[in-house]
Image (cartoon, rainbow, N blue to C red):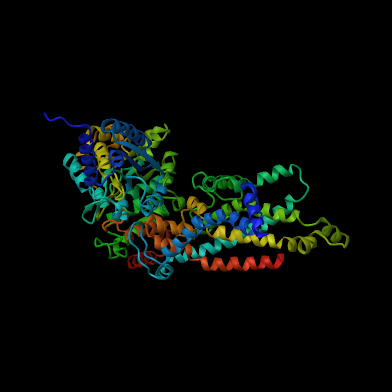
Amino acid sequence: MAVGNIAVTARLPLRVRVRELLDREQVLGPLFVTPALFLLVLLVAYPFCMALYFAVSNAFIGRPSHFVGLRNFVNLWQSDAFRQTFQNAFVFTGSAVALKLVLGISLAVLLNQQLWFKRAIRGAILLPWVIPTALSTLGWWWMFNSLYSVVNWTGIALGIMDPPGPNWLGQKYYAMTAVVTVNVWRGLPFFAITILAGLVSIPRELYEAAEADGAGPVARFWLITLPMIKPVLAIVVLFSTIFTFSDFNIVYVLTNGGPINSTHLFATLARQVGLETGRIGEGAAISLYLFPALMFVVWAQLSFVRRQVY
Amino acid sequence: MESIGRRRFLATTAGGGLAGILAARVPPARGQQREISYLCWNNFAPAMDKKQNDIAQRFTRDTGIKLRIDYIAHPQQPAKYAAEVQTQAGHDLVEMRMHFPWLYEPQLTDVSDLVAELEKKHGKTLSSGYEAAHVNGVWRAVPMYHGLFVPTYREDLFKRAGLKVPDTWEELYTVGKELKKMGNPVGIPISQNYDSISTAGPVLWSFGGMEVDRDGKTVRINSPATEQMVEWYKKMYRDCMEPEVLSWTDASNNESLQQGKAGWIHNPVSAYIVAKQRKLPTADLINHHRSLGGPGGRHETDVPRSIGIWKFSKHVEPAKEWVRYLLGKREVYDEWVMSADAFNLPIYERLQDHPVLRTDPKYAALGAPGVQYHLYGWPAPPTDRIQLITNSFIVPNMLAKAVTGTPNKEAIAWAENEMKKIMAG
C-alpha cells in the first residue's frame, strides 16, 4: 500500500506538488516571513549591532578601534553640552507628545462629526505629515527668521507683539517653543488620523444607550470614548515618543542645536560629534544613551496594550 | 630571417603576455581601465563647478582618462566621506574642506610629490593651506584654492555719515555705534554656526589670545586677552548690533547686508558677488576693506580647500593626472579661478597678484598685505580634539552667554572647562 502511495505521489505534476507544499502552514509561514526577516537583519539588526559595538569602542573614522567598555557613556556625562541635550530631549519629547495627544484627540473628535467636505478636510490634515520634513521646516525657519519673520510681522500688525517681536531662534525658551511647535504641527496628523480610526470603530449603540441614561457630552467622552480608544492611544503615544526622542531634521534646520545648546537633541549632537568630528564611538554612545530607557517604555506600553486588548 | 610559425607565435605572445600580467599583478581589463571619479562639494560659486566640468571634458579628450565628477552639498560631506571610508569603496578623489585632511589622514594617499611639483611652478602654499593639508609631516591633500573672510561694509553709509573706515576692532566699535543709530547695525553672528567662529577667531587672535596652545594640548582660553575679547563683544552687542545675531545662520549676515539692513559684516566676498549677480540695489553700495587688527596683530580666518586621493583608490596615478591637469597647467588653473569671480582665490604664493583681483575695483582689499590667515583653532594643529572644540561651538556659546548676562569670568571658566574635558577625553 505504501509503495502504491509513493508511486501515486511521484506521478503528481510539479504544480500540484508545490501547491500541496504551500498548503502546509509549517512551510508557508516561514516562507512569508523570510524576506521580512532578511531585510530586518540586513537593515536593522546589523547596523544596530554595529552601533552597539561602536558605542563601547573608541572608533574613529577610518582608524583601528579598540574596546573601551562604558568609557564613552561616562565621559559624555561630564560634558555640559550632553547634559543639556539630555534635559532638552525630555522637555522636547514630553511637551511635544503631550500637546500632540491633547490636540490629536480634539481634532479626531472634531473630524468624527458630520462636517461639510469631510473627506477633503481629512486629506488636507494629512499634508504636514506627507511633506518632507526638511522642506516644511525650511518654511518654518523662514517664518521664525529674525529678518523676515511673518509670525512677528503678523503679531505686530495685530497689536499683540511689541516691535521687533520675539527673537524666536535666538533665545533658549523661544527656540524650544519653536522646535516643539514645528514638531507638533508635523506630528498632529498622525495622532488625529489614528485616533479617528479608533473613534470610528466605537459602536454607536454605546453612545445612544448613554444618552438615554442622561449622560452629557463630557461624561460620554470620559466614560465611553476615552476607555474605548485607550489601546490606540497607547500605541500612538509609544510610536510618537520614540520618533520624537530621535527627531533630527527639525532641530538641525531650525537652530542647529542653539542657542547655547538649548535645543540640541541626541540625534543632532550625535551628528556633530560622530560625523562632523569623526568620533563615531562617542556619536554612537550619544545615540544609544537612552536605549535602555526607551526599551523599558516600549515594554511597559506594549504590556499595557496587551492587557487592554486581551 | 627565420620564419615564425603560427604555433610558435601564439606560444611566445601568450607566454609573454601572461608573464607581464603576473609581473604587474593587474588583470588586463583593469590595466586598460582609465576611469576615475571625483566627489566634489557644490561650490558656493556655481560657475566654478560648471567650468570644472568643461575642464574635465578637455582632460578626458587630452589624456584618454574618463573622469566622473559627483557634486554634493557641503553639509552632506562628513556623512558621505565616513561611509566611503568605512566601506573602503567610492570615489578616487575627494574635495577636502579646511581640516578634513587631518580627520581622514590614515585614509589619504601621500601626495607630497604632487605638492612639490605645484610649489615649484606656483610658489609655496599659503600658511593656511599648509596648516590644513600638511599632516604630521606629510601632504595628505593638494591645496587647490582658498576663500578668505574680509570686512564688508556699506560704503555709501560711511560716506554719508563721514565715518572713517576702521583699521582695528576697537575702531569698528566706534563706527558701529554710529551705524546702529542710523538703523544699519553691525552684523556679527553669535550663534551655533561657522561664521560666528570665523569672526570670533580673528578677534581673539587680534587681542593676543588663543583657545589651545601650539602644542595642541594646553587650554589657554582663560586669559586676559579672552576677557578683553569678551568685553569687546559685549559692548558691540549692546551698542552696535541687534539681538537677532543670536539666531543667525551662516547666510544671515549676507542677507542682512544685501537687503539693506546691516552696515558692516565680516564674511567671504560672496555677500558682494551674490548682490552683484542678482543685480540687487545694494550691490553698488557694498565695498570691502583691509582686515582688522589689534594688539596681537592682524589675523583672518581662511577656508582653504584641497583635493585628496583615498588610499583604497585603485587609480592613484590617473587621479594624480587630473590634479596635475587642473592645478599644474597655469592656463587651466587661471581659467578655473577666474570663473569664481574672486570667491575662491589661488593658494600659492606666486599667484597672489592674480588677474581675478583686478576684475573689479572692489576686490582690492582681498589679500591685502600684513594679514595672517589661519584655520579655526589656530595656533593649535587641527587635530580631532581641536575640531571637536570648533564643532561644539564653545567660543560662540561662551560669547552668547556673556552678552546675555552671564558674568565674563563665569562664561570664560565654562568654556575652559568644556575645552579641558574635550582635551582629556
Residue B159 appears in the picture as rendered: no
Going by the picture, which residue comes out furthest to the left? B1
Q: A163 left or right of B82?
A: right
Number of marks: 0
Residue B111 appears in the picture as rendered: yes
Query: Which quarter of the rendering shows the C terminus of chain A?
Result: bottom right
At 48% from the left and 66% from the top, the residue drawn is: A289
At 31% from the left and 60% from the top, the residue drawn is: B211
Q: Is residue B149 above or below residue B201?
A: above
Residue B265 at what x, y percent from top left? 37, 45
Q: Which one is nearer the viewer's eye here, A163 or B10?
A: B10
Q: B368 left or right of A217?
A: left
Going by the picture, which residue comes out furthest to the right? A212
Can you tell which quarter of the image residue A102 is in?
bottom right
Residue A188 at what x, y percent from top left? 63, 53
Q: A133 left or right of B414?
A: right
Residue A166 at what x, y percent from top left? 53, 52
Residue B231 at what x, y percent from top left? 35, 59
Q: Which one is nearer the viewer's eye here, A166 or A53?
A: A53
At 27% from the left and 48% from the top, the residue drawn is: B141
Can you tell which quarter of the image residue B235 is in?
bottom left
Q: Is residue B253 above or below residue A58?
A: above
Query: Which quarter of the rendering shows the N terminus of chain A?
Result: bottom right
Q: Which one is nearer the viewer's eye here, B169 or B222?
A: B222
